[in-house]
Image: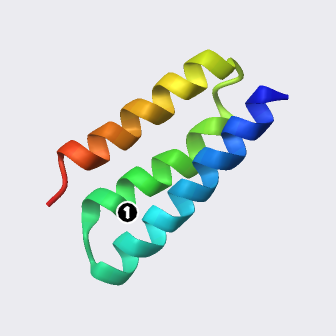
Amino acid sequence: MMTLILGGVFSVIGMVAFWYGRKSKKNNPLIGGTVLMVFPYFVPNPVLMGLVGAATLVGMYLFRE
């Protein structure tokens, strides 16, 4: 159940970041949003999913253009 919730949360955040990156023509939110939307399909462990999602969000924040 937690995998489904985390996957949904990260996918929604990724979709918003992707839309923002596409609209503002910035690569960092575009790539980070794509990663956040796609990776929940490949990570079945909820702890690992949380770590990968948090690392992607931190990376998007630290390496913003």
Return the residue found at the far right. Answer: 1
Taking the image as shown, residue 46 lies to the left or right of residue 28, namely right
Is 32 drawn above or below residue 30 in the view shown?
A: above
Q: What residue is drawn where x is 54% and y is 55%?
A: 13
Q: Amino acid at mark 1?
A: Leu
Taking the image as shown, residue 1 lies to the left or right of residue 34, namely right
Q: How is the image coloured?
A: rainbow
Q: In terms of image quadrants, where is residue 49?
A: top right
10 Å crowding of disc 1: few (<14), some (14-19), many (20+): many
Report x, y in % for residue 48.
Answer: 57, 18
Residue bearing mark 1: 30
Report x, y in % for residue 34.
Answer: 48, 54
Q: What residue is drawn where x is 65% and y is 31%?
A: 42
Q: In terms of image quadrants, where is residue 25?
A: bottom left
Q: What residue is drawn where x is 29% and y is 80%?
A: 24
Report x, y in % for residue 40.
Answer: 64, 37
